[in-house]
Amino acid sequence: MIIDSHCHIYPEKIAPRAVQSVDRFYDGLPMGHLDGTTGTLLSIGKAAGITHFVVHSVATTSAQVHSINHFISDAQALARGAFIGLGALHPDSEDLRADIEELKSLGLHGVKIHPDFQRFEIDSERAFALYELCEEYGLPVLIHTGDHRYDFSNPERTARALSAFPRLKIIGAHFGGWSVWDDAERLLPRFPSLLVDTSSSFFWMKPDRALRIIRAFGAERVMFGTDYPMWSPRPELDYLNALPLTDEERERILWKNCAELYGLDADDKEINTDA
C-alpha cells in the first residue's frame, strides 16, 4: 500500500482554469502536464504504484463549500475505495456547523483549508471557531502551512493554533511550512497532535535536509504527499525512497500514518482506475 496524502482534484469543466490559477499564485511553479482531473490522478498513480489518494479542493468563498463537498463525495464513491475525501470549509460561512454536518453526512473524512487562498490567519478567532467544531466532530484538518510572501499560515501562527487545540489532529502541509522550513523545524515538532506531509517540498531540498526534518518530527508523524497536480508522483517517490530511512520509517511515511489517521483498512489494497 502507498497513500498519496495530498491531492487536489477538480471537475473536468473547470480543471484547466483551476490549475492555471494555482500556477499563477505560485509564480509559475513546475506543474508539468498534469490536468487536475480524477482520471489522470488514478492513471499516473497506478503507474507509480500508489494505491490510495487523499483528495480535496479549496473553497475560496463560502458559497463554494456545498458544491465542492458534493463533488469530492461523488469522486470518492466513483473511485471505489481508492479516494479518501476531505471536505472544504470556509471561515466566513453563515453556518459552519451545518456545513460540517453535511460533509460528515457525505462520508468525508476530514477538512482541507488553505489560509493563503482563503485570506485568513491560521490563529485568528475566525479560524478558532472552525477548529473548535472540527475538534467536536472528530475531523482531522489538513492546512496549507507556510509561505515567505505572506503571514497567514507561517509556523509562529501554527504554533499558537496547536497550543489552543491540543486534541485536534492537524496536518501541516509541506513539512509544516512551505518555503519557511527552518522556522517549521524549529517551532513545530514539540506539538504531538501535529502531523506533516512531504508535498511540494522535495524540489527545494537536498536529501540531507529532508532527512533531518523527517527525523525532527519523527517518521511516525510524516505522510507522503505530492500536491497533485503540481507534481508527478514517480519522482517524488523516487526521492523519498532514496533517503536512508529504515523499513519501518518508510512504511510509516508511505501509508501507515495516513491509514491510521483516516481509518483505512490495511487490507484494502485494491485500486479502481475506471472512475
Image: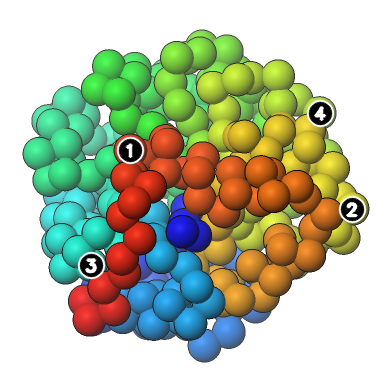
In what element is the residue under mark 4? helix
In what element is the residue under mark 2? helix
Q: Are marks 2 and 1 in contact (CB under 8 Å)?
A: no
- Of the numbered discs 3 and 4, the one sitting upstream in the chain is 3
Q: Is residue 87 left or right of residue 113?
A: left
Q: CA distance from mark 1 to mark 4?
A: 30 Å
What's the amino acid at mark 4? Arg
What's the amino acid at mark 3? Ala
- Of the numbered discs 1 and 4, the one sitting upstream in the chain is 4
In what element is the residue under mark 1? loop
Residue displayed at 35% across by 60% down: 269
In what element is the residue under mark 3? loop
What's the amino acid at mark 2? Asp
Q: CA distance from mark 2 to mark 4?
A: 16 Å
What's the amino acid at mark 1? Gly
Among the 4 quarters of the image, the one containing residue 43: bottom left
According to the picture, the residue beneath numbered tag 1 turns out to be 263
The x and y percentages for residue 213 are 79, 41
- Of the numbered discs 3 and 1, the one sitting upstream in the chain is 3
According to the picture, the residue beneath numbered tag 2 turns out to be 208
Can you say whether 150 is above or below 228 in the image? Answer: above
Residue displayed at 71% across by 26% down: 189
According to the picture, the residue beneath numbered tag 3 turns out to be 79
